Image (tube, rainbow, N blue to C red):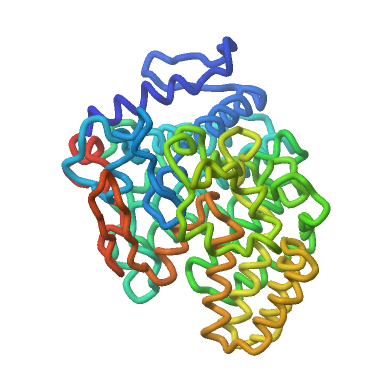
Amino acid sequence: MRKITTIIAIAALSLSSIGCDRFLDIQPEGKIIPVSVEDYRKVLTSAYSKYPVHKSLTALRTDEMNIDENVNEFNVYREIAMWKDSNTDQATAEFPWVSFYSVNFYLNQIINEGSKTMADSPEKQQILAEAYALRAYLYFDMVNLYGKPYNSATAATDRGVPVSLEIDLEQVLKPSSVQEVYNQVNADIAKAEGLMIEEKQPSGINYRFSKVALKAFQARTALYQGDWNKALNFSEQVMTAKGDLSNLNTATTAPNHYASVESILALDNAFNIAVQNVSFASTELTSKYNTATDKRFALYFQKNGSKYKVIKGGTTDFRVSFRSAEMYFIKAEALLKLNRLSEAKDTLLKVVKNRYTPEGYTAVQNQISSMNATEFMTFILDERFREFALEGHRWFDLRRANQKKIIHNVNGTEYILQQNDVRYTIEFPMSAKKNNPLL
C-alpha cells in the first residue's frame, strides 16, 4: 500500500500549482497547507483540470465504435476493445486509478483543512461546496467503472471501490460495498447542497459545479439507483432553471459543446482526440439514425471512405458532463417507470422536436403514439444511444439496462461480450492490485 500512496502523493504534489504559480507551503511532515481562499481555489482548479479522462476508454468497450487497425496507437487500445482486463500487454492503456485518488487527495485536503484555515466568506462556502460535489462525482464514476451496477437487493454486499475521506497517505484502502459508496456520494451531495452559492456558472468556467449542476447530478444518481420519484423531482427542478434545448434545425453547434445553451457542467473530456484518432463509428450506431431527417447525424459524424469518423469530440470545446437534454430523458424514463406513459412520451417529444426535421418529428410522433411501456422503454434507450453518442453514457447505460451481447472484430478475430457478462464490471487495474493486496 505504501508504494501506491507514494505515487498518489507525488501526483498530488504536482497539482499544487497552476503554471509557474507556486503558492503552497510544504510542511516538514509532508502535508500541503494552503492558507487563503485564493490558494484553495487554485488547488480546486488543479483538481478539476486533472479529472481523469476515462469515458473515452469506456466507449471502446461499447457498441458505439470500431477500432482502426491501421494506426500506430492500435496496440494501446486493442485489448480494451477486446474486453481484456487481466494479463494485458504492457502497451495497453489502463483505466485510471491513481489519478482518481490523486484528485481525491486534494479534495480531502480542501474539505478537511480548508474548512478550518479559510476565513468565513461566501467564497469559502462555494469552494467547499464544489469540493464535496466533485468528490461525490468522482466516487460515482469510480463505482460505475469498477463496481457492479446498483441493485438495491444486492448493493450492500456487492463490491464497490475504496472510499478515502482522509489525507493520511499511509491508510490501507479496501473496497467499500456499492451501497456504501452510493451512501457517501449522496452524503457529499447533501453537504454540497447546503453550502453551494452559485446558481449557475458562466460559460468558460462552467467546468465548476453550481446549484443547477448539483441538481442534475442528483437526477442522474437517482436514475441509476432506480429512485424514480427523486429522479423525476430533480430533473424537473433542473429543467425549470436550465431547460433550454438546442434546435438543430437552426443551430450549427453540437449540443455537447461547452458553450451550447444546453451546457450545465462542462468538465469531462468525454471523447478525447487519442481515441477519436483510433476509431470509427460502428455501423450499429450510424444505422440507428435516419440520415434524411435526424439533424444530429451531420453534426456527429463525417464520412471517411466507407466509414464514418466521430466529429462531436476531440477538442476541449466538447467537454460535457451534464446538459439539459439529459434531464428530459431522465424525466421521461422516471415517468415511464411510474406508469405515466403518456406524460413520458410528451416529455421526450420535446427533445425529438429539436433534433429532427419537421417531417421527421411527425414521423417519430406517429411511431411512438401506439407504443406500450416496454416498447417505449426500448425507444428511450435507442434515442439515448443517438443523442448521447460518445459522451460517456453508453457503457453505463448498457450496464444498468440490458447488458446486451456485443461483438467486436479486432485484427480479423471475433471477440464477444456475452449478455450479462462479468466483464460489464471492469476489473481493478493491474497496477492498483499489484500495489494493494486488499483489492
Residue plotted at (64% across, 42% down): 266
Res. 129 image quadrant: top right
Q: Is residue 438 or residue 425 the one in the foreground?
A: 425
Counting from the top left corner in percent of width and height, residue 51 is at 50, 36
Residue plotted at (26% across, 60% down): 416
Q: How many marks?
A: 0
Counting from the top left corner in percent of width and height, residue 149 is at 38, 64
Residue plotted at (49% across, 47% down): 307
Q: Is residue 183 or residue 241 the one in the foreground?
A: 241
Q: Is residue 424 left or right of residue 313?
A: left
Residue that protrudes farthest toward the right in the picture: 250
Q: Is residue 109 or residue 395 the one in the foreground?
A: 395
In this orientation, does residue 198 appear? no
Residue plotted at (66% across, 50% down): 298
- Tell me: residue 19, above or below residue 383: above
Res. 29 image quadrant: top left
Q: Quadrant of the N terminus?
A: top left
Q: Is residue 214 left or right of residue 11?
A: right
Counting from the top left corner in percent of width and height, residue 277 is at 47, 34
Q: Is residue 259 or residue 199 the one in the foreground?
A: 259
Counting from the top left corner in percent of width and height, residue 343 is at 71, 82
Res. 126 image quadrant: top right
Q: Is residue 280 left or right of residue 23?
A: left
In this orientation, does residue 349 appear? yes
